[in-house]
Image: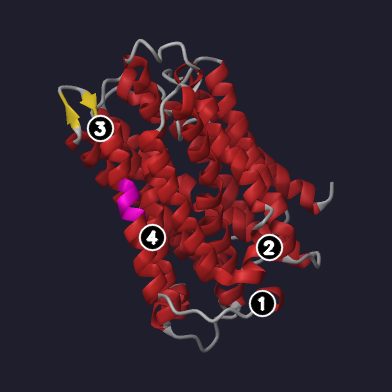
Amino acid sequence: MNIKLRLKIMIFLQFFIWGSWLVTFGSYMINTLNFTGAQVGIVYSSNGLAAIIMPSLIGIIADRWVKANVLYGILHFLGAITLFIAAQISDPTMMFWVMLFNSIVYMPTLALSNTISYFSLENKGFDIVKDFPPIRVYGTIGFILAMWIISLAKIELSNIQLFIASGSSLVLALYTISLPACPTSNEIKDKSWVSLLGLDAFVLFKDKKMALFLIFSMLLGVALQITNTFGDPFLHDFALNPDYKNSFAVKYPAILLSVSQISEVFFILTIPFFLSKYGIKKVILISMIGWTLRFVFFGYGSPIGGGFLLLLLSMIVYGCAFDFFNISGAIFVEKAVDHRIRGSAQGLFSTMVNGIGAYLGAVISGKVVDYFTVEGVRNWQSIWLFFGGYTLVLAIIFAIVFKYNHDSNALKNG
């Protein structure tokens, strides 16, 4: 089996696990377990809390002591156990702690999958910028397939989604045996304490440009977590209106949301062109505009007529919004840092986006949802327009303060 196919299978399973529950779990907690918006936000914040420390810590371990592919398998095995336990919990506090442990073992695998892919491709003489995005597409396909299975099986409001995620995690843990071994770095002689402790990537904050890039990546992570947490509950709430009860958006919300991931497939393939031609600043600005449109279209969308078209447009722009900061950002970091700290740098990037950003997004969005909820009825238009205003302001500030001179050869040559 060639290396690209092996990596495609790994990435497919990596995101199939997440797609099995990430989008629909909020609806399960709100509609089946009767959690409040704030309680749902707190449970989702476990992703962010774990990702604040764990990706960097695991990246450090992968750089220094334990092969990335070995760590990857161990973490997914532990994830299978925690998801199995979570499927049997109905208390919000207990759900938070179990999902926190699941996040502790899952979130680092996002960065590790990048590290394994980058090393394996370079080791075989492939170009990361050109050859990684088509491989990463299979993660999106896995996410989409999982969402379709959950929706078509009518288990969006059931704990069965967690059992499926658990089984998938176990399969991936076993599959890691077939992955290439990623060597650790033995270059520790005459290193500073920062380097010996594996905290090399934090020196990136000394570079103003890189520090600003990481901070804005964190702030975009807030936007991503908002839709992960409340996109599906938003569509389920249309069922409260008799006129919408039998609409496609209400009957199969996860399938409608999966159009977002389908859109990702196409936008991922455009990343090499946009990064090479326009540079990271313009690519991130396009992403911010995409997030603003995502929220505005949600705010004015509805399940029928012209409103349904707006919902579809919201799904389409998500692909651009997500890929142009998440995938492009990871590639930018990979090419911009010293090769000896790649694992740590990817861990730090993941910490900013999926850690601090995701935590703030989950907690704040939960409070915003409850703020715009009166007698159990959520005013989703006000909620989405509030978030749209946030990303618009973010784009304006980023355009002003982030200084970057694009060199079209930089990403090609590393």
Residue 53 appearing in the image = no
Please tell me which of labels 3 and 2 falls first in the chain: 3
- What numbered label is drawn on residue 306? none
Amino acid beneath label 2: Pro
**Contact (Cβ within 8 Å) of mark 3 with mark 2:** no
* Numbered disc in front, either 1 or 3: 1
* Residue 353: percent from left, percent from top: 42, 57
SS for dot 3: helix
Q: Give the CA separation, mark 4 to mark 2.
A: 23 Å
281 shown above or below 410: above
- What numbered label is drawn on residue 408? 1
Q: Residues within 10 Å of mark 3 (few under 14, many from 20)?
A: many
Q: Give the CA separation, mark 1 to mark 4.
A: 25 Å
188 relative to 241 in the view: left or right: right
Whether 73 is among the magenta residues is no
Whether 388 is among the magenta residues is yes
| Residue at the disc numbered 3 | 37
**Contact (Cβ within 8 Å) of mark 4 with mark 2:** no
* Residue 163: percent from left, percent from top: 50, 24
SS for dot 1: loop
Q: Give the CA separation, mark 1 to mark 2.
A: 11 Å
Instruction: Name the quadrant containing residue 194.
Output: bottom left
SS for dot 2: helix
What residue span does the magenta drawing correspond to?
387-391
Amino acid beneath label 3: Gly
Q: Residue at x 35, y 10 (%)?
A: 242
Considering every residue shown, the one lying at the far bottom of the view is 190
